[in-house]
Amino acid sequence: MSAITGIYYFDERLVETQLLNTMGETLAHRGSDDHNIWLESSIGLGHRMLWTTPESLLEKLPCVSRDGKLVITADARIDNREELISLLNLENLPQDKITDSQLILASYEKWGQSCVDNLVGDFAFAIWDKTQQLLFCARDHFGVKPFYYYHSEQLLVFASEIKGLFCLSEVPRKLNEVKVGDFLASTLYDKESTYYQDIFRLPPAHTMTVSPEGITVKSYWNLDPEYRLELSSDEEYAAKFREIFTESVRCRLRSVYPIGSMLSGGLDSSSITCSAQKILSENKSSQQNLHTFSFVFNKVPESDESSFINSVVSQTEVKPNYINGDEISPLIDIEKIIWHQDEPFFAPNLYLDWKAYEIVNQLGVRIILDGLDGDTTVSHGTGYVRELAREGQWLKLMLEIRGYTRNFRGYSQEFNTSAWIKFWFYLEYYGIQPFMSKFRITRFIWYRYKNLETKIKSRLNKDKPVISWSSIFNSQFLEQIGIRKRLKIFLKERYGSGTTEQHEHYQAIKNGILPTTLEVLDKTAAGFGVELRYPFWDKRLVEFCLSLPAEQKMRLGWTRMILRRGMEGILPKEIQWRGGKGNLGSAFEYGLQTFEKDNLEEMLKHPKLIENYINMSYLKKTYEDFISETSKTNDVMSIWKSINLFLWLKYNNMSS
């Protein structure tokens, strides 16, 4: 993790040294080890360095090519170093002396703007091409490294965080109310907009070319939702998964500082931790063991995963660190967090990450492996159930549903539902309804039956309050920003219209929730000089998992089957074959009720900042029910989004 900045004046003004330095100082928390700028006439680049990999100790950025025609600033870790060194014919040089930014620069010299096609890793970079008089920028495949920018007819300015852009007086600080609506509706599909008008994010897997003639943003990579890998056996699939996953973990262990791993006791974090410690133990040149960071919840047992965490700790040689999660407020250090975030953040469990990174920093650990959203990479495989129903394979469908309810029973009401009731839902929706719709008389009978069913359900549930997604909105604001149309786009983006498990898997990977989450976590970790690495978000692993047949993802009700099989002999059995997981929502609600009544009540007493956006009567009633614990709906997320928005507007002196 480092910081990159840049200014390009199209009107040929000279870039001021002090301005670039101010941008760097604003982002100093991202890189405490070195800082430099480079400027030439109307173009200037800046960098703040945080040493992490062995090669980064030698890195001086911005870096100028030998012929002086190219200059790069980069926040990057390249994972296919050996492959690139071979392709670039650099084998005659000491490999441990070649920095990652030099590899990117050499790739651009050889392939031009197509260089990104050969890069694997996490990166955000900008290259000034003096010959072509253009600035070439790129961001990694999933958006691990952030890149924000503003442009007008006179200039383009970019930075790793939005606050860096505001160092220029030309950059406006205007609230983007459409983004506020997206936040309240939880429609986080947009990969480009921010909460500020005219400030944008370079989307993941995109490049941006900038010259006085204009700006071009285009995609350089996408997944293939049609390609399916065909291997000969379950064992061969599992072996291939383990090979790719192990390499994904291994290449993220490059560090000159102690390494840590988040360990929740779930499949994802446990797989990473066990694999990483195994690799470190087998590496004779490595003298370190992995630090692990886990939350325990003594007062909220529904959230506690101690038994699973201890299964990993007892099996490995990790150095465990336990944090009492139920003693931390969800609004801990909120003013500092808001400063680092620059924007409202949806993540309700961010307070746990903030506390963990603080302890990580105190122990001198700079690298943290995180299992974030590994279930999306691997896929739960539940789209297989719908695939079977569409194909009319009712016996296979029943076997999957019976296994699913058996394997996961006890984790939520969904899993406690009878397998026959679940089976009937799919039979009715995919089998009976299409047949009954074919003929006029059967259509008539079917519609009468469904109307009667609806009336009966309505009477049975008449005392049960129904929460609409729009309940939180001030009605005038709701209509003003056209959020209903945006919600339809979000639902299509999130769920698509896929007819197979593979199509549903593809939609889940490509939606905009992931890069938003990655940006939030990046800025949180940056507050403590910590770099996050995500083995499950390796391009090679994601492509492999998407290409798998559906039955490799779900089998006899076991979801994420390829991961369970691939981790045979690595994971403790009780984790490898566990069902669901603890509910962190319970700890979050406990924390709000225990620690944050004052902040919540201030928001309700002084609603001016948010009343143009939020239905205050609904919010007050929801809060009263929540605090008194009498709510039947328990719409705690409306409370969370409201207080988050309120405090962000307050601390940024922004008003509606």
Image (spheres, rainbow, N blue to C red):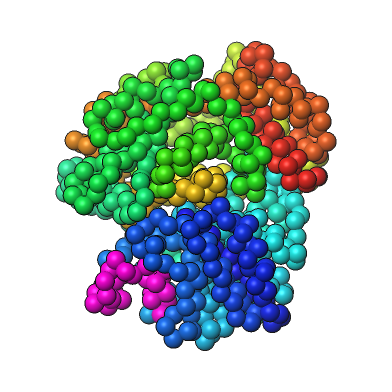
- Residue 406 image-quadrant placement: top left
Residue drawn where x is 69% and y is 82% of the image:
12
> How many tags in the picture?
0
Q: Is residue 428 above or below residue 173?
A: above
- Taking the image as shown, residue 294 lies to the left or right of residue 627, namely left
Find out whether residue 336 is within the magenta segment.
no
- Taking the image as shown, residue 426 lies to the left or right of residue 308, namely right
Residue drawn where x is 42% and y is 74% of the image:
105
Residue drawn where x is 18% and y is 49% of the image:
284
Q: Which of 246/334 is in front?
A: 334
Quadrant housing the C terminus: top right
Highlighted range, magenta: 83-109
- Taking the image as shown, residue 259 lies to the left or right of residue 330, namely left
Q: Which of 79/320 is in front?
A: 320
Q: Which of 570/312 is in front?
A: 312
Q: Is residue 298 above or below residue 527?
A: above
Residue 123 percent coordinates (x, y): 45, 61
Residue 577 percent coordinates (x, y): 27, 28
